[in-house]
Image (cartoon, helix red, strand yellow):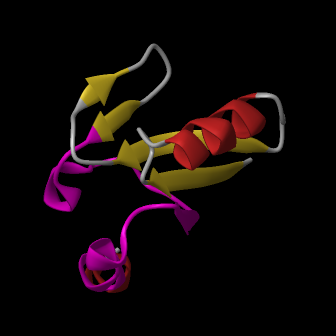
Amino acid sequence: MIKVLVSGASGAMGQVLIDLIRKNDDFKVSAGFSKDEILYEDFKIYDNLEKIQEKSDVIIDFSSKDSLNPLLAYSTKK
């Protein structure tokens, strides 16, 4: 199973992506990143990348351009 971190998870495209991932048995949302923290039954959306403890295989980014550099820094640490 491929674990996906969704950046921009609370936005319209992030929500579409989360719904598609939930319908596919080969993928799982490991965590989300957005401006607001939200706790779902199967994962959490964090408002700070440093808070994320879950491991992910890939990051899919539907956030703003301002999130790119922090996401790149985060991905090189993990």
Look at the picture and state if 16 lies above or below 43: below
Which residue is painted at 76% across and 37% down in the image? 20
The residue stretch that appears in magenta: 46-72
Judging depth in this view, the residue of 68 and 54 nearest the camera is: 68
Which residue is painted at 57% across and 36% down in the image? 15
Is residue 57 highlighted in magenta?
yes
Q: Whole-percent x and y of residue 29?
A: 57, 40
Which residue is painted at 54% across and 41% down in the image? 12
Q: Whole-percent x and y of residue 41?
A: 45, 13
Which residue is painted at 25% across and 42% down in the image? 46
Task: From the viewer's perspective, tell me whether residue 37 is left or right of residue 58.
Answer: left
Task: From the viewer's perspective, tell me whether residue 27 is left or right of residue 73.
Answer: right
Look at the picture and state if 29 lies above or below 44: below
Q: How many marks?
A: 0
Look at the picture and state if 4 lies above or below 59: above
Task: From the viewer's perspective, tell me whether residue 15 is left or right of residue 22.
Answer: left
